[in-house]
Image (spheres, rainbow, N blue to C red):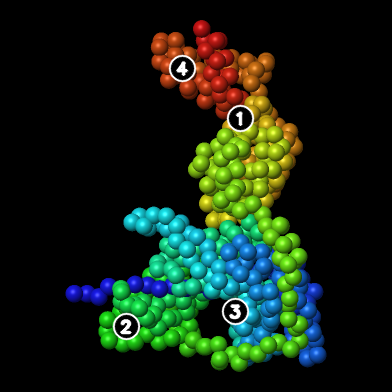
Amino acid sequence: MAKEYETVIGLEVHVELATRTKIFCGCSTAFGGRPNSHTCPVCTGMPGSLPVLNKKVLEYAVAVGLATNCSITRYCKFDRKNYFYPDNPQNYQISQLYLPICRDGYVEIDVPEKDTPGTKRIGIHEIHMEEDAGKLIHDDWEDCTLVDYNRSGVPLIEIVSEPDMRNAKEVIAYLEKLRLIIQYLGASDCKLQEGSMRADVNLSVREVGAEAYGTRTEMKNLNSFHAIARAIEGERNRQIDLLEAGKSVVQETRRWDDGKGSSYAMRSKEDAQDYRYFPDPDLVPVKIEDAFLEEIRSRQPEFRTEKMARYKAEYQIPDYDIEIITESKHMADIFEATVALGSQPKKVSNWLMGETLRILKERELDPEDICFSPQHLAKLIALSESKAINSTVAKEVFEQMFEKDVDPEAYVEEHGLRMVSDGDDLRKVVEEVIGANPKSVEDYRGGKERALGFLVGQTMKRMKGKADPGSVNELLKELLK
Ligand SMILES: [Zn+2]
């Protein structure tokens, strides 16, 4: 009988923190910029330069730790992780090995499997603070590699989970949960594609019922949920094939190639001792006082579960809408701000659930990318509700708003899009249409209701869409009596 295997997965998630300056110097963390323009002696590893910890990094790390049920290390230190690579100007990375800032936490994920509904607890082994490395650029010149240190010293937290996940769905549920918590905290935008959230997957397989873990491999370069799911499936099968063939799995770091749908060995996986860690003598240990901890605790935001409960009580919108809107802190903020400006909650929700999601999906964007303001959405809803514009025009204006955050009122005036619902203009056009389409008029009078639709269409066309179809309909009926 064929053996049955269980997959065991743990994750190392790196999150780039949303501080304005780097972790140990005052250089900007802004993305892009001319290569090596956001640098100084500290983040380029010049001898004699001294790092000083950015307090904001500590605040974010503690906030994430509290939100993930960790215990906070009251006396923590930084360590040097030694390795030689051109993206690392000091020849060591400042990280935390012995006394990481947070330990022993967990998050609850909804278990997506049908047979075991409910929640599952995924343990968090630790969270530590560290600095990012520079970036090597290989592609722009044929015979050399250049290095950009703008990213060197950008603050990261690394969230190390326990090996508690068993399949790709659990991994994705866990990542989504982390992303949501961190976005709600405002600690990072957590974009996988842009690298502000990066996940390394540690995976091993073992026979069902076995106690000991199998040999694990680590997979890097996973920059979408889709790539993660595919890489897990691929690696699980690769390891099982090896074991079935009587071979053994080698402990190594592998790089996932999403284009080819396969991974290849990068290097044998190092153990901590290979990095010759030692406490950084340039940085003083961090002592966390009660007052600091209390301050962070008091500043924790309303997280998604609480927000969902409040929406249910406060706004008359369906549960499904609540679920989608609160999936993004940014979208929830827009929703609340627009309602606060006087728009009806369901109307706001309709624009977010309808056109907004449609455009986001079409352009493969995240809700975090929405850039129109609540003021403008409220104006658009008001224009639409007062029938100053019809639904077709409203959608057109919305697209402009989504694109450039244009002011809907100004845009409607500028392009003459205000609807004509009564008055002489519309009556004149309807009369023209009746005069120009005697056959349809005859059909309608002869009892063919469908002919009326054609006449409405002709009128709308002449009005360049600026009429309210309902009013056109009524007026036609009245004039054709
Ligand atoms: Zn610097």
Disc 4 under 8 Å from ligand 1? The reply is no
Sequence-wise, which precedes: disc 3 or disc 1? 3
Residue 100 or 440: which is nearer the viewer?
A: 100
- Check disc 4 and report the residue beneath it: 440
Q: Can you give x and y, in whole percent of width and height, for residue 223 in the image?
A: 53, 68
C-alpha gap between disc 1 and disc 2: 63 Å
Residue 413 or 187: which is nearer the viewer?
A: 187
Q: Can you give x and y, in whole percent of width and height, for residue 12 in the image?
A: 53, 74
- The amino acid pointed to by label 4 is Ser
Do tag 4 and tag 1 residues touch (Cβ < 8 Å)?
A: no
Do tag 3 and tag 1 residues touch (Cβ < 8 Å)?
A: no
Q: Residue at x 52, y 25 (%)?
A: 457
Of discs 4 and 1, which sits in the foreground?
1
| Element type where label 3 sits in the image | loop
| Element type where label 1 sits in the image | loop
Disc 1 under 8 Å from ligand 1? The reply is no
Sequence-wise, which precedes: disc 4 or disc 3? 3
- The amino acid pointed to by label 2 is Leu
Q: Residue at x 62, y 89 (%)?
A: 277
Q: Is residue 98 left or right of residue 216?
A: right
Q: Can you give x and y, in whole percent of width and height, for residue 435 in the image?
A: 55, 14
Is residue 179 visible from the viewing direction of this image?
yes
Of discs 4 and 2, which sits in the foreground?
2
- Check disc 2 and report the residue beneath it: 242
C-alpha gap between disc 4 and disc 1: 25 Å
Marker disc for residue 139 = 3
- Check disc 1 and report the residue beneath it: 390
Sequence-wise, which precedes: disc 2 or disc 3? 3
